[in-house]
Amino acid sequence: MRVVATATAVLFLTAVTAAAQTGRGAVTSLSTEPGVGTGMVRFIVRGQNPCGAVHLQFGDGTDNVTYPIRELPWSVEREYTRTGVFQVRALGMGNCDGEAVSSARVTSVRPQPVAPPPAAPPAEPQAGSRTQPQNTQNIRFAEMDRNRDGVISRQEWRGSQRSFEVHDWNGDGRLAGDEVRQGASWPNRNQGQGTQNTAFWDWSETQFRQLDRNGDNKISRIEWARYDIEDFIRADQNGDNVLTMREFMLGDVDDDRGDRFAYLDMNSNNRIDRSEWHGGEAAFRWLDRNADGQLSRAEVAGTELDSNAGGGGNRSSGVREPARNVIVNARQQWVDTGIDVRAGDFLYVTATGRVSWAPGANPTDANGSDPAGPNAPLPGAGAGGLIGRIGNTQAFMVGANLDGHRANTAGRLYLQVNDDLLTDNQGNFRSSVIVERRR
């Protein structure tokens, strides 16, 4: 038995041209070849770096998958469970554009487990009953619906009371209708609750446009700052710290946004295993960044245990101040942000723009380029990248997205380009800084 894979690569020259002009990467070709084992196909994606994520559509009706990657070329194997010719599509995600298509011909597969006989149909509802049978395979939390009536009662719910209340939109003590329909529009609970409510409910295109204040068709963490970061992390499928329209809109992949780590962690071990997880398999995979089969607090909520909590309690979320915009001139040494931080505060910085850190050097973004020399403020880190320091302490890397850097000392925050000779530099970084004050 064997697999025969044939490929037709499509090269998108426009994507390469655009990538060269913007410094973004691009997917340009996709090829396939037999993998190791029956039913296995290897996919090889090629293109132009940088490329931090690739989204693969396998063409067989199974879940599509977004893979965080380091660089192109990149390959992955996939097992098909049925024979046929499947059209496969690879799309660049995050800092990577372009797409390519290919075909895979699968001639044999491993024997599949025999499905158990279907359960007996539920009893016909009595006249006047408000519960009507439905196809429980197409609803959320279907595995909890023990009597297969299409309704999840509190007794059937596998989780905390607070978690149940999150999903019981109308508060009637049962989950039914749109409450269990994948992709259903959420009720806008933000209305009438003032501007301090951090829960987010309106996952509509209109709301996406309102949040996208700079009009770049992406929502950054800075633009999201007033809302709970857990929802952002759930929706950010490729982990690139921005939400595209496709990630933002509720689709057929159940990422269980709206529920909270604290509500799901039933045994309080600061981990969520598959028995505690309420969302879909695809969402569990993309949140499980280290692929250890568990979701940590950092992977789901963006925070870990506070080592100074004295007893191991969870770090309570602090108070986030409004974002402050700071221009960092590439020629200026340690730009004073005007921001004083306290020990235990958390810093969130997003930086845009490009600078040239040496004559003839290609401009770089805030992540820097080649490792800086021994005389740079932060040797070994990206030359020309954005760095910071608090008071006169050791410099640390900021880059294009600094996510939750914990201040170990109190002092003024300064920013600078990572270079030992600033006088021949050109350009500046536009940084937006948020301080989360510890309670």
Image (spheres, rainbow, N blue to C red):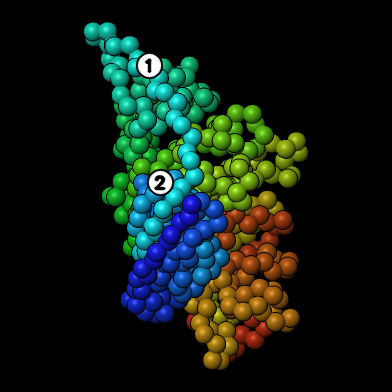
Residue 237 in the image: x percent, y percent?
Answer: 46, 52
Kind of element beneath mark 2: loop
Residue 324 is at least partly visible in this image: no
Instruction: Give above or below for 412 relative to 372.
Output: above
- Foreground pick, 405 / 328: 405
| Residue 126 vertical position relative to residue 299 in the rendered view, above or below | above
Crowdedness near tag 1: few (<14), some (14–19) or many (≥20) residues, C-alpha within 10 Å? few
Callout 1: SS: loop
User: In the visual, does 51 lie left or right of 105?
Assistant: right
Q: Is residue 80 above or below residue 177?
A: below
Residue sitting farthest toward the right: 310
Furthest residue to the front? 1
What residue is shown at x 35% (from left), y 55% (from top)? Answer: 85
What residue did someone put label 1 on? 120
Nearest the viewer among 333 and 278 is 278
Quarter of image, res 417: bottom right
Instruction: Please name which of the two marks, 2 or 1, marks the residue nearer to the observer.
Output: 2
Label 2 environment density (alpha carbons within 10 Å; few <14, some 14–19, many ≥20) = some
Disc 2 target residue:
82
Residue 343 locus on image (x, y percent): 70, 53
Q: Position of residue 335 (x, y in %)?
A: 59, 73
Residue under the image location 55 percent in, 87 percent down:
361
Badge 2 amino acid: Arg
Q: Is residue 141 above or below residue 242?
A: above
Question: Looking at the rendering, in which quadrant would you find the C terminus?
Answer: top right
Q: Where is residue 389? Give x, y as percent.
A: 67, 67
Along the line of sight, which residue is nearer the eye, 256 or 148? 148
Amino acid at the residue labelled 1: Ala
